[in-house]
Amino acid sequence: MNTSIVSIGLANPGKPIDQSAIASFMQRAHQLDDLEARKLNFLYRKSGISSRYSVLTDFEKTDSQDFTFFPKSEDFEPFPGTKARMEVFRQTAPGLCEEAVTSCLAKTEIKPSEITHLILVSCTGMVAPGVELELMKRLDLDDSIERYCVHFMGCYAAFTGLKLADKIVRAEPEAKVLLVCVELCTLHFQKEYVEDNILANSLFGDGAAAALVMKSSSGLKVNSYLSQVLREGESDMAWGIGDFGFEMRLSKYIPTLLDQGIQQLKEVFEQKFKLSTVDNFAIHPGGKQILQKVQEAFDLPESVNEHAKEVLNQFGNMSSATILFVLERMMNDNEIQGKILSMGFGPGLTLETLLLEKS
């Protein structure tokens, strides 16, 4: 039996917030005039996103006097610092993780007490003692469980977690590994009106996903994987810790750079994954243009991104958790069988590729 993803559970905070409501919030936050407000509205309408989730309720408020996190001032000053944002992460991330794990395990016969390894993934919050320790307490996991944390690797980090889980199961065939991704991207809203912030503010949402990885004849079998750094895009996607939350550098040239990188790697993909025999693709929906460029680079029909587009539309980009939202839908789609090539992108510019097989 191969290592397999046997179950995936999902969780989001609160209720979905309409993309148009977030656009209105951003217009006030950036203090835009009518012309710039119309430009921003156009960007949000063309984003491919209809709603997103946030642990903060302020994004749907029409009056700053109703804010509970951001200041009740017209200019959003004093703007919340990193400490305040990490406190919200500390308070809210464990509950979201618990919800995702509970959903994941409820689809199996595996009890929490049977979990042997716990991998926590997040690039939007760090605290010690960590979220994984709080999650162990909430789930009543054994204190001797092996735990690992993957921090600050960005949108491709779930691939890193899955590869680690696969290596653990290969080394310890009886292992039952729980991978948990939690990303509270909206905590890091930046109000300076520059291109990087405008793009990031239009895309990212909050969510958590948990995957159970173990030896099994069912689920999504892990066949092989490949990691590649596209150095040309090193300065186009980056993630740093600032005084007012985490700051993202997100260039509009990323889709084009990915297209160029994939074109260069096609022969490598054919040798590694027998690309010509793969019918199904699970692409990280980092944005509408990214999905389109990857589809075009592989000369694929639009239908190949059906589930990724659906996730982007309903949730936005939830960083590392997003690909598990896509794979969960593909697991539940009876029309999808056989090989699935999954791809994710992040700072570096890093391209992670994972070949799965649905049985």
Image: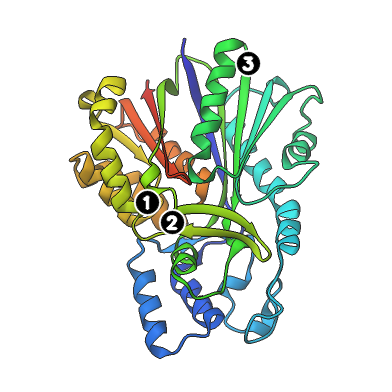
Q: Residue at x 55, y 18 (%)?
A: 167
Circle nearer the N terminus (3, 2): 3
**In this picture, is 357 found above or below 202?**
above
Quarter of the image that includes the C terminus:
top left
Q: Residue at x 51, y 51 (%)?
A: 318
* Mark 2, other Cα within 10 Å: few <14 / some 14–19 / many ≥20: some
Q: Residue flagged by tag 1: what amino acid is it?
A: Glu
Q: Secondary structure at mark 2?
A: helix
Answer whether residue 44 is visible to the viewer in this image: yes
Q: Secondary structure at mark 3?
A: loop
Tags 2 and 1 touching, CB below 8 Å:
yes
Q: Residue flagged by tag 3: what amino acid is it?
A: Ala
Q: Residue at x 73, y 42 (%)?
A: 131
Q: Residue flagged by tag 2: what amino acid is it?
A: Gln
Query: Marks 1 and 3: which is nearer the front?
Result: 3
Is residue 90 or residue 254 the one in the foreground? 254
Tags 3 and 2 touching, CB below 8 Å:
no
**In this picture, is 304 found above or below 113?**
below
| x, y percent for residue 106 | 60, 32
Query: Marks 3 and 2: which is nearer the front?
Result: 3
Residue 85: image quadrant is bottom right
| x, y percent for residue 279 | 24, 30
| x, y percent for residue 197 | 49, 67
Query: What is the C-alpha distance between the residues marked 2 and 1?
Result: 6 Å
Q: Which residue is mark 3?
A: 175
Is residue 315 or residue 350 the one in the foreground? 350
Query: What is the C-alpha distance between the residues marked 1 and 3?
Result: 33 Å
**In this picture, is 14 found above or below 169?**
below
Answer whether residue 204 is visible to the viewer in this image: no
Q: Which residue is mark 1?
A: 310
Residue 314 is tagged as 2
